[in-house]
Image: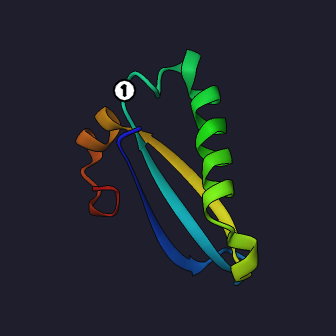
Amino acid sequence: MVLIRYSLESDWTGDPSIFFRVLLSDEAAKPTRLHGVAQRVAMNLEREVDVESFGLHAYLNFRSKSEQDNLKEPAWA
């Protein structure tokens, strides 16, 4: 994993939510590893950030470093 960013916004239903943007190394984002890496990240975030106690819904989005290098979206930097 390279870094995690987040934003607090309403989801499509208008409910308060936290959107995590998880930037993975290219190695971690390989198809053979992505599922396991994503599960571990989700479990760690769930353990470390008790979003339910804040009344939030959590959403996780993953992107590889090379994908971000191509897209250059500031929210992911």
Outermost residue on the front side: it is 48
Quadrant location of the N terminus in the rendered image: top left
| Chosen colour scheme | rainbow
Front residue of 71/9: it is 9
Which kind of residue does numbered mark 1 sit on? Asp
Residue 10 position (above or below residue 46): below
- 12 left or right of 29 in image: right
- 55 left or right of 27 in image: right
What secondary structure is marked by label 1? loop
- 51 left or right of 70 in image: right
- 70 left or right of 20 in image: left
Q: What residue does disc 1 label?
A: 26
Residue 13 position (above or below residue 32): below
Residue at the spot x=56%, y=20% of the render? 33
Quadrant location of the C terminus in the rendered image: bottom left
Q: Position of residue 18 (x, y in %)?
A: 59, 71
Residue 23 position (above or below residue 59): above
Residue at the spot x=47%, y=55% of the render? 21
Q: How would you rate the neighbour count of disc 1 (Cα within 10 Å): few for under 14, some for 14-19, many for 20 or more?
A: some
Q: Where is residue 28 in the image (x, y as percent from the top left)?
A: 45, 26
Residue at the spot x=55%, y=65% of the render? 19
Q: Where is residue 50 in the image (x, y as percent from the top left)?
A: 69, 68
